[in-house]
Image (spheres, helix red, strand yellow):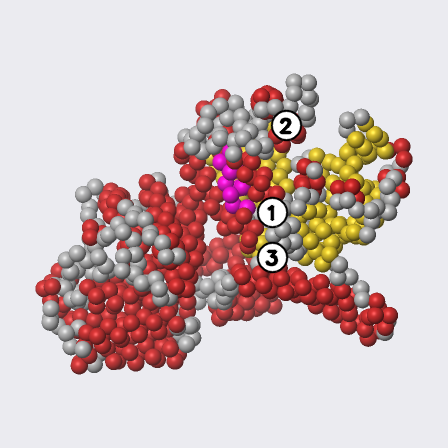
Amino acid sequence: MSQERVGQILNDLAADVVMLEPGDLSGLGLLLNLIDELEKPDVSGGFEFLLPLAGKLRDAIVTIIYEEFSDPEKSLELLSGVVTNMQETFRSGPPANDLGAPPSESVVPSAESPAKSTSKPTSGADPVGHESSSRLSDELFVGVDFDQDQDLYQGFIAESNEHLDTIEENILNLEQDPENSEILNSIFRPFHTIKGVSGFMNLKQMNVIAHHLENLLDDARNLKFTLDGDATDLILDGVDFLKKMLEQLTVALGGGIPEAMPVNDFLNRTDNQHKILLGEGVAVTPESSTDILADVVDDFETAEDEEPVKVGEILVEEGAISKDDLEGALYEQSAFALADPGKPQKKVGEILVENRKTDPKTVDRAVNKQQQRKASGGVAIKVDTEKLDNLVDMVGELVIVQAMLRQDPDISALGTRKVTQNMGQLARITSSLQKVAMALRMVPIKQTFGKMIRLVRDLAKKTDKKIDLVMFGEETEIDKNMVDLIYDPMVHMIRNSADHGIETPAERKAAGKCETGTITLKAYHGGGNVIIEIVDDGRGLNVEKIHQKAIEKGLLIESDQPTDQELFNMILAPGFSTADKITDVSGRGVGMDVVKKAIEKLRGIIEIDSTSGHGSVVTIKVPLTLAIIDGMVVIVGDERYIIPTLNVIESLRPLKEQYHTVQGQGELIKVRESLLPLVRLHQVFDSAAQTVDPWEALVVVVEHESEKFCLLVDELVGKQEIVIKSLGERLKDLPGIAGGAIMGDGRVGLILDVAGLVEK
């Protein structure tokens, strides 16, 4: 009966910790009540080995209650780790040689005489009370019940993937700055979190792997070795291994059978590499479960020393002072402290005011902001993207209704001042609400850019090249859906730059270049779009080779004289490749075709430019979001169409002498000394037109892949932000039409697909 009761108490502790929120004193009180229950002699009889752990948990809870811990979120995470250790110790049982021994002898090693402690892990148990690596099964998640707490596991997968992306990005930053302890800590912490949560969720293999990697990083933090070279590769391999395990966890949640993975092989390789890093012949000493727990609880004590954002840093952020001003003040502060250690240290704000770098009011404001940051801790919540999509859709409907009200003749006929004021206020509120709704979906492109760092590193290794990746504009925001969809095209472009663009060190040296090639990623907003540039300083595109390949594939004939830009665009054709050999990196001719289709699916465009011997530039332009489009509204007969402004060059009413007909090429309009094909929209969509003569109508010059042509329209209504609506399954592949929009009068306008019009 006692065993069942202890197990129930531990399960209740675990459940209550999961439900705990920062500042929930009543929840912490419930945890203390459960610990009291566990410590009763009639309950803990035979399980005395758990009592020291319960005492540690009590100490941690009291620390939180008295607000002696600076990071509420981390405090809850650490509580979870303590409870997990208690559960695992309960499942493993007491050390075999110490059954029934007093807790002080059997579990807690003496600080004064550690050698006399009889504590040691049970046979087959690892340092934290888990099954040892030699006995772990390569079959994943055996015995885990996925029928319960599906949401909990899904949340764990999402959180863990974010943590692994952070680790990946930071460890590559550490390669550039191996002595930076802050970067090293930012790698250690996510592994610590994954270890704790996976242990709580009974994901044993994942827990042990994360723990082994955490141990390795901890030794690096303690300066036992420098984390670079092979050690970096090992951590990155661990990240990949854990990501694959998360993929298999997703399979298991979906009812599938996860694939077995070489867990033990990886753990053995990790341990062997760890020993080598520590010095040949040096073994990794296993720690007892209570040592690990002590480290966890120590985090409560050491976390208090973590300093908040400095006042000087806030002043630099706000532009009140320069970095040089701050460095000067810090130097003066250090000199003052060294000159007279007995006196109270001068504050940076005081020094800046004394030196007239800023004023007391500005410093006071920075101090207040520092206090606000300490109090708030950057509170954020996570919202399901489906809910955000619904919100954006409803706001879109609101925008449409507001436009319909504005154009309603009955309301316009009232014409009173009150109605005009109310309609204006409604328009302002609707516009603001639309901007806020769209901003909720916007995320920095930094996450996608960060993944490219690892990609370039691996490609450089695989191709025996030296390549640096330089990034600008990582904070540029883009719709969350766009971030996911833009990833594959960027991977293809980076692969091409690394494999075909950047030369080998010997080739670069012979060409008078630096042996290390550079790939530059840029992101910025322009004209309502997100523009991404991928620039390399490699060999550039070989125009002659592309020309010859185009002739071989039947895309050109010998007599054709295309421009360089037209030739560059040909590499986007399916199956087009100028690679001399196919590698496992690129060269099959499928990459650029995939890029083109993916970008067009995003209603974007791709442009390529290159200079032989100096490198290439690939420019990708995509809209900020897929929900709203910036468009030019035009009228053709009784119908209205929306042309995406991304494709619009200019509009004009041509003179009669600018209109030409050429046999075999149809109708042409001369615009700025260039003859551009004329497309009559009323003929394309089989509708009536108000005017058929171009010199009495209007033409809109549009561009797709550097190919320009004119669209004949009757009237220009103007530029508008249009909420895109799907035309349904039956009309979704209609050539020349990308979608629909409900206009202000309630009628439907069709959004033109310029790429589709070119093909028609």
**Relative horizontal placement of residue 487, taking residue 418 as reference (left or right):** left
Mark closest to the chain's N terminus, 2 or 1: 2
- Mark identifier at residue 117: none
Give how far across and how far down residue 22 sits, in percent.
Answer: 42, 72
Q: Is residue 529 above or below residue 30?
A: above
Q: Quadrant of the C terminus?
A: top right
In this view, the residue farthest toward the left is 97
* Residue that mark 2 sits on: 567
Q: Main secondary structure of the magenta part?
A: helix
**What residue is shown at x 48% (from left), y 54% (from top)?**
331
Q: Give the Cα separation between the discs numbered 2 and 1.
A: 24 Å
Mark closest to the chain's N terminus, 2 or 3: 3
Residue in the foreground of this view, choosing between 49 and 134: 134
- Mark identifier at residue 319: 3
**Relative horizontal placement of residue 405, taking residue 624 as reference (left or right):** right
In this view, the residue farthest toward the top is 558
Query: Secondary structure beneath disc 1?
Result: loop
- Amino acid at dot 3: Gly
Residues in magenta, as a range: 486-497
**What residue is shown at x 68% (from left), y 18% (from top)?**
559
- Amino acid at dot 1: Leu
* Residue that mark 1 sits on: 602
Residues marked 2 and 3 touching at CB (< 8 Å): no
- Of tags 2 and 3, the one toward the viewer is 2
Give how far across and how far down residue 109 sits, in percent.
Answer: 17, 65
Residue in the foreground of this view, choosing between 327 and 664: 664
Mark closest to the chain's N terminus, 1 or 3: 3
